[in-house]
């Protein structure tokens, strides 16, 4: 069957069905393992959620191996929701939320729902052994609703296992629960991190150290929207901590990505110590559309990104350096793009770059960058504005078949979006800026299941 022209070459997509949160990200057994929440039977995500799985030796060559983590036990009767992975004694332990909604007239916030924290071992090919129940709703703080999910687990240099869970309090305040364990199986609550009035639910938490400083990442729901801040229906960002997770207080919140399509990010370590990030390149409950659902699949992950600190508490991002191998030689801008491409340049004054109907506007003197669409290829996406430092504005734009990511000023500000242009070359126009172009070779993907 002919490959559809919206099928991406650089962003991992499911062979069929629905994809959302990245899960269980790890280097294990000589390969990267990227799990994701997956509904193979329904492109609208309406069926039971399991974990799909990709494996890669280098972030460029990928193999889709199926869905090794399936729900259906006594504590995950409905879905296998999001979580993380950690290696221990030759196995990769998958920590996740078992979700179940009881039939009946429930609100599923205060009644009628189970969110159980479980783990199961993965040997690199399949889940082995029994699923272990670690915590249930009865074990979480009494002032939490039934919404407690998405465990992120790591082990510190002190040998202590730590886990953060996203939660919603009875006061409708988002929060993160920090747990300790001596062995990864028995868990004790250490503290609750929250910022009163800052959303009603914090999903998909992550906690990590960079250059001696700790950061807490989360995806808050319920933040008030502004013209240049919190523009999406839900947000994803991070707080710097002024100390260790056990004692530090949350500092200012910064959004990871200012574009239309970015949610539920998770980080993990490459074997050389770099911190890498992947996110769901979509937005739940958004008012705009994703037309590939009618074709049998929906959503993708972002490019794998490297994350580092700028020395002032801000985090920067760039596509993982392994992806540079996909980049051809740079040259002058063509009149149209005939495939995935990378465009780099600088705007020293007001300028504009249009890739098909995707329009990127640079206003360095005003300290503003604007992403919008001049035609229907945005499928309902409107405008996103990102404040940037005043002065010349450097950019690195990666354009795929139906998605784009732009990194501004060395990755200090990032915007991601899906778009759905008509088949054929994408007209390219630029004014008021200097730029160069390079073609991008597709990632190599092997599917054990049919792609279409």
Image (cartoon, helix red, strand yellow):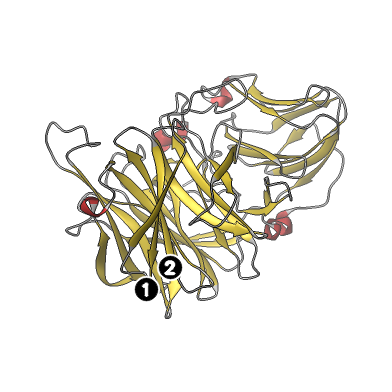
Q: Image quadrant of residue 443? A: bottom right
Q: Residue at x 34, y 71 (%)?
A: 121
Of 226 and 340, the residue lying toward us = 226
Q: Residue at x 87, y 39 (%)?
A: 332
Of 105 and 163, the residue lying toward us = 163
Q: Secondary structure at mark 1?
A: loop
Number of residues whose C-alpha sits closer than 10 Å to that of mark 1, classed few (under 14), some (14–19) or many (20 or more): few
Residue position marked by numbered label 1 in the rendering: 183
Which disc, if any, is residue 161?
2
Report whether residue 235 is seen: yes
Whether residue 254 is situated above or below residue 275 in the rendered picture: above
The image position of residue 328, as x and y in percent, is: 78, 53
Number of residues whose C-alpha sits closer than 10 Å to that of mark 2, classed few (under 14), some (14–19) or many (20 or more): some
Q: Residue at x 65, y 53 (%)?
A: 307
Q: Secondary structure at mark 2?
A: strand
The image position of residue 408, as x and y in percent, is: 74, 38
| CA gap, disc 1 and disc 2 | 7 Å
Of 209 and 14, the residue lying toward us = 209
Q: Are marks 1 and 2 in contact (CB under 8 Å)?
A: yes
């Amino acid at each position: 069957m002919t490959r559809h022209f919206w099928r991406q070459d650089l962003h991992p997509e499911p062979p069929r069905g629905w994809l959302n949160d990245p899960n269980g990200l790890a280097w294990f057994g000589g390969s990267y393992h990227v799990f994701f929440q997956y509904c193979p039977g329904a492109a609208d995500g309406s069926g039971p959620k399991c974990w799909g799985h990709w494996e890669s030796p280098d972030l460029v060559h990928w193999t889709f191996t199926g869905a090794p983590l399936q729900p259906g036990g006594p504590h995950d009767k409905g879905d296998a929701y999001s979580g993380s992975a950690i290696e221990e004694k030759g196995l990769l332990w998958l920590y996740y939320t078992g979700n179940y909604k009881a039939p009946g007239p429930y609100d599923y916030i205060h009644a009628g729902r189970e969110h159980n924290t479980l783990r199961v071992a993965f040997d690199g090919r399949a889940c082995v052994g029994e699923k272990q129940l670690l915590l249930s709703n009865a074990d979480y703080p009494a002032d939490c609703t039934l919404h407690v999910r998405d465990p992120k687990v790591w082990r510190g240099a002190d040998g202590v296992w730590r886990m953060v869970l996203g939660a919603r309090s009875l006061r409708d305040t988002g929060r993160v629960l920090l747990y300790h364990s001596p062995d990864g199986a028995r868990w004790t609550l250490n503290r609750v991190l929250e910022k009163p009035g800052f959303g009603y639910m914090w999903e998909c938490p992550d906690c990590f150290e960079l250059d001696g400083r700790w950061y807490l990442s989360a995806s808050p729901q319920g933040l008030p929207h502004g013209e240049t801040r919190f523009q999406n229906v839900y947000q994803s960002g991070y707080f710097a901590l002024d100390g260790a997770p056990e004692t530090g207080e949350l500092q200012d919140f910064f959004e990871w990505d200012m574009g239309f399509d970015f949610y539920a990010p998770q980080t993990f370590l490459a074997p050389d110590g770099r911190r890498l990030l992947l996110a769901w390149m979509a937005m739940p409950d958004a008012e705009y559309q994703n037309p590939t659902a009618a074709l049998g699949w929906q959503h993708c992950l972002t490019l794998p990104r490297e994350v580092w600190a700028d020395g002032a508490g801000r985090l920067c991002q760039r596509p993982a350096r392994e992806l540079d191998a996909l980049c051809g030689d740079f040259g002058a801008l063509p009149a149209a793009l005939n495939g995935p491409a990378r465009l780099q340049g600088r705007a020293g004054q007001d300028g504009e770059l249009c890739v098909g109907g995707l329009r990127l506007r640079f206003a360095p003197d005003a300290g503003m960058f604007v992403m919008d669409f001049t035609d229907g290829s945005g499928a309902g996406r409107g405008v996103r504005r990102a404040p940037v430092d005043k002065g010349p504005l450097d950019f690195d734009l990666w354009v795929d078949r139906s998605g784009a990511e732009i990194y501004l000023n060395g990755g200090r500000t990032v915007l991601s979006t899906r778009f759905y242009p008509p088949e054929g070359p994408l007209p390219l126009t630029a004014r008021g800026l200097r730029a160069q172009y390079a073609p991008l070779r597709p990632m190599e993907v092997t599917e054990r299941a049919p792609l279409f």
